[in-house]
């Protein structure tokens, strides 16, 4: 959104940023001599398909890549779809400007946007690059005083990364289409992330649970104080814990450990119960813990996911909004460093909010692992100085914005606070040769924990939870064993990755950039490589097939070390230490090893599609091997050479499909080939079957002249409960209940997408949960139809899911609505649908404005008047319908 032009006779400088929100914030600090406009993200990119390739390149062998691999990897850039109008607007504004300031973000992407703007706009006025870490008046004015040129090395690094991703994606993805299934995608970091998730699932599938026993006892002092302790050893032999078992075999790693059975545990219990107990040892060790460093992009995503369940995408959207409205510093950073003014601001708040005893004598400094200092000047912290208190901003922020700002504020303050100090106490009790142990902890001085505890919303409450206070017993003191009982334990498989855990692992391995993790997770979810269950990322069988292909035939492309090394090399290009053309040539054509092109050329004929899409489950005694096959229309179980097959439900995690479960599903599928009986009216067989989307009944066979009739089971029905009578009732839907006693017309019972309902003409009413469409009577249906209609089609205006602030473009409130085809945002003029992978609760005002701006730039979605021809056609159709109704009556 452009700021007012300068008054006549004064200089006019054009400032270009990425987003309207950023433009508005900067506009608060600059006077009328500056016109501020947004590019709305990237303005140029590589063509996304053959249709977008300019005509002069279409005959080239490399045209589909959008990169001239034969001439120094020269990329073809075109104006991004929907950005032409905005580019023209920027060109018009530039004609009236005396200077051009490019104030895009300070990272590689921001540098590239500024470079592309220069290439497109071809300015004839002086050009300045403005870089700032926070959008405050002080930072903006300082940037204006110290502008710089565009950093060509950073641009080359971004361009190289983009070309690598294009060569990788456009090279490997078609191989997946041919050998696994259509519409799959591969990516430099995406494919490695999928491999991590698949490897974790393989570990869960190979896991063998182990059961072990121990004892838990309650001991009491003569004063009445008591505590619980757990058996640790018997007659000098240590009792194992879960970590002592091999997850692949379920056996003890160390055979010298004492693995108790239930009987042995009860025998030991009887032996101890009658003996004397005494304190063998009391160990008291002081401890100190240091505060966590300020947030980086990765640690912010992890903590927001742990504490609030926010996805990486949602976290970055909210952080972007806080940055662009001037509340926090730049949110894409790998640095844990704080500027001197920020350290002083934090220390001042520690002194005023918590007291001088919580302030260390010297400011704390944190070492960063970042190699590229150009891209990460500071950690994420509250903007400006002094920092705004969270409560001061509560009224002006959304709930998610407030929670994230509060999190960043607390972490920043805590990073400059004193250490926490306390004592760890371990008591060992001896009872007739059996040793029991319990550990406790006391906090002597909470230090930074007063402000921030990782993973906790309430530091004060968490301090109490962290303390485990034990009685002050003495060595040699006699104790009474008041209660003792055997406890059984079963080892658990390794946890699946949550978004936070995957982000942490990718960062630890040096794979990709934390700022890209949100889009990577979103992509693998959208491509159905993974799905979510209780917050965990579960791989699909398609992911297994893709990983098998890449691991066997293109192993370096999913090798963790190789992928991490690529990041180091891209960093070297950004520092001007490595030539980008040489690097791209080595990657694509090869140097001392085969490049990507040569590897791909040989794989089309070499790869057996059947083998890469085949995942063995095992072989029963005397039976044929059972495997999962990934077909073009979904995964299925196959026995032997196809003697028996069964569909796999879409929501079944791979580790739940054991050999035993697979055999059971094959048996049920075989039973499905035997009919429940025959329909008395048609004589056709009636089956109960299980498909990808769940169980259903079917009348007729696939070979019949007429297509077999199917009907899904109703909610709560189980396949084993279905008999011929119930199946025929399901197949009878919609069921004619009779005519309306007052107004005539048939009333029908249906089972629909949103549940069972009754219908009479255009009127519909949902059936209550206790009434089935198979049993509903005419009288019940008439009573329901007489009631006022509820829900979507009642004619009443539906309440918005969420209402944001007014749009700066239209002045209308920005609303999130539930439409016929899913949730969408509107500013009263333009509508924009939410991406399929974005939960509505994660939408922020900033993201909504960006979506609306992009949609408006692309032409918008607005109600259009019917064209004359269409209007006449509609009127004719209405008249014919009206005439037919009159004739009928």
Image (cartoon, rainbow, N blue to C red):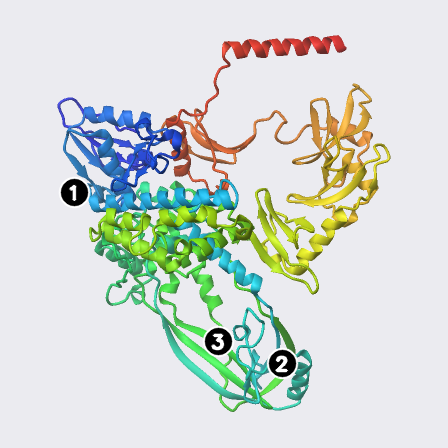
**x, y percent for residue 712:** 71, 39
Q: Earlier in the sequence, mark 2 or mark 1?
A: 1
CA–CA distance in space, label 3 to label 1? 57 Å
- Whether residue 696 appears in this view of the structure is yes
CA–CA distance in space, label 3 to label 2? 26 Å
| Badge nearest the viewer, 3 or 1 | 1
Q: Which mark is residue 148?
A: 1
Local secondary structure at mark 2: loop
Write down the quadrant of residue 697 in the picture. top right
> Could you tell me which residue is drawn at 31 percent across and 38 percent down?
67
Local secondary structure at mark 1: loop
Q: Which quadrant would the N terminus be assigned to in this image?
A: top left
Local secondary structure at mark 3: strand
Q: Which mark is residue 509?
A: none
**x, y percent for residue 377:** 24, 52
Residue named by callout 2 = 260
């Amino acid at each position: 959104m452009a700021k007012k032009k300068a008054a006549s006779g004064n200089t006019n400088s054009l400032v270009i940023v990425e987003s309207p929100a950023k433009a508005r914030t900067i506009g608060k600090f600059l006077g009328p001599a500056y016109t501020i406009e947004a590019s709305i993200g990237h303005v140029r990119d590589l063509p996304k398909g053959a249709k977008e390739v300019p005509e002069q390149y279409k005959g080239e062998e490399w045209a589909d890549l959008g990169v001239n691999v034969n001439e120094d990897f020269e990329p073809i850039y075109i104006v991004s779809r929907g950005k032409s109008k905005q580019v023209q607007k920027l060109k018009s504004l530039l004609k009236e400007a005396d200077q051009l300031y490019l104030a895009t973000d300070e990272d590689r992407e921001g540098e590239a946007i500024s470079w592309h703007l220069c290439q497109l706009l071809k300015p004839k006025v002086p050009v300045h690059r403005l870089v700032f870490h926070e959008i405050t008046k002080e930072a903006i004015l300082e940037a204006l005083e110290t502008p710089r040129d565009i950093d060509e090395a950073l641009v080359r690094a971004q361009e190289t990364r983009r070309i690598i991703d294009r060569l990788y994606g456009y090279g490997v993805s078609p191989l997946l289409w041919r050998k696994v299934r259509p519409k799959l995608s591969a990516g430099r970091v995406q494919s490695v992330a999928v491999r991590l998730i698949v490897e974790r699932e393989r570990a869960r599938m190979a896991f063998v649970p182990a059961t072990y026993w121990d004892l838990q006892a309650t001991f009491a002092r003569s004063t009445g104080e008591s505590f619980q302790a757990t058996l640790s050893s018997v007659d000098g032999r240590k009792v194992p814990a879960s970590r002592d078992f091999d997850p692949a075999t379920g056996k003890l790693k160390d055979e010298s450990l004492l693995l108790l059975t239930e009987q042995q545990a009860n025998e030991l219990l009887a032996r101890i119960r009658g003996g004397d107990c005494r304190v063998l040892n009391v160990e008291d060790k002081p401890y100190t813990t240091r505060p966590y460093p300020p947030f980086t992009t990765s640690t912010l995503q992890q903590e927001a996911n742990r504490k609030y369940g926010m996805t990486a995408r949602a976290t970055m959207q909210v952080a972007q909004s806080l940055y662009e409205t001037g509340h926090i510093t730049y949110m894409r950073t790998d640095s844990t460093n704080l500027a001197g003014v920020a350290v002083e601001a934090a220390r001042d708040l520690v002194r005023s909010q918590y007291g001088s005893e919580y302030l260390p004598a010297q400011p704390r400094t944190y070492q960063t692992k970042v190699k590229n200092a150009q891209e990460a000047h500071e950690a994420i912290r509250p903007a400006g100085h002094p920092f705004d208190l969270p409560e001061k901003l509560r009224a002006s922020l959304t709930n998610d914005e407030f929670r994230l700002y509060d999190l960043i504020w607390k972490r920043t303050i805590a990073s400059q606070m004193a250490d926490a100090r306390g004592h760890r106490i371990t008591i060992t009790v001896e009872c007739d040769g059996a040793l029991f142990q319990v550990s406790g902890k006391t906090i002597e001085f909470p230090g930074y924990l007063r402000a921030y505890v990782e993973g906790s919303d309430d530091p004060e409450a968490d301090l109490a939870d962290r303390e485990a206070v034990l009685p002050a017993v003495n060595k040699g003191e006699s104790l009474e064993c008041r209660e003792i009982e055997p406890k059984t334990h079963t080892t658990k498989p390794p946890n699946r990755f949550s978004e936070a855990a995957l982000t942490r692992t990718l960062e630890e391995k040096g794979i990709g950039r934390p700022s890209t993790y949100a889009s990577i997770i979103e992509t693998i979810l959208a491509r159905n490589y993974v799905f979510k269950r209780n917050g965990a990322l579960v791989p699909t069988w398609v992911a297994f097939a893709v990983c098998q292909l890449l691991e066997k035939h293109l192993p370096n492309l999913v090798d963790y070390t190789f992928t991490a090394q690529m990041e180091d090399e891209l960093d070297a290009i950004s520092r001007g230490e490595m030539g980008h053309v040489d690097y791209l040539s080595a990657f694509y054509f090869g140097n001392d090893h085969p490049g990507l092109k040569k590897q791909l050329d040989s794989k089309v004929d070499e790869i057996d599609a059947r083998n890469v899409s085949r995942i063995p489950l095992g072989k029963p005694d005397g039976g044929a091997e059972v495997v999962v096959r990934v077909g073009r229309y979904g995964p299925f179980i196959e026995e032997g050479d196809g003697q028996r097959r069964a569909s796999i439900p879409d929501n079944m995690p791979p580790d739940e499909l054991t050999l035993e479960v697979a055999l059971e599903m094959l048996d049920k599928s075989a039973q499905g080939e035997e009919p429940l009986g025959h329909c008395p009216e048609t004589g056709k067989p009636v089956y109960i079957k299980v498909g990808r989307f769940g169980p259903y009944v079917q009348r007729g066979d696939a070979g019949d002249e007429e297509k077999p009739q199917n009907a899904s089971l109703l909610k709560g029905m189980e396949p084993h409960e279905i008999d011929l009578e119930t199946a025929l009732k399901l197949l009878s839907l919609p069921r004619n209940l009779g005519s309306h006693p007052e107004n005539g017309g048939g009333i029908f019972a249906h089972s629909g997408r949103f549940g069972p309902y009754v219908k009479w003409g255009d009127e519909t009413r949902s059936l209550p949960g206790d009434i089935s469409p198979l049993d509903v009577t005419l009288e019940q249906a008439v009573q329901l139809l007489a009631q006022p209609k509820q829900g979507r089609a009642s004619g009443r205006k539906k309440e918005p899911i969420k209402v944001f602030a007014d749009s700066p473009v239209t002045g209308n409130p920005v609303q999130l609505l539930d439409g016929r085809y899913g949730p969408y945002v509107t500013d009263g003029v333009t509508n924009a649908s939410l991406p399929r992978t974005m939960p509505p609760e994660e939408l922020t005002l900033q993201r909504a404005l960006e979506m609306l701006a992009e949609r408006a730039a692309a032409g918008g979605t607005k109600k259009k008047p019917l064209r004359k021809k269409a209007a006449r056609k509609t009127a004719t159709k209405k008249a014919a319908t009206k005439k037919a109704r009159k004739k009928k009556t």
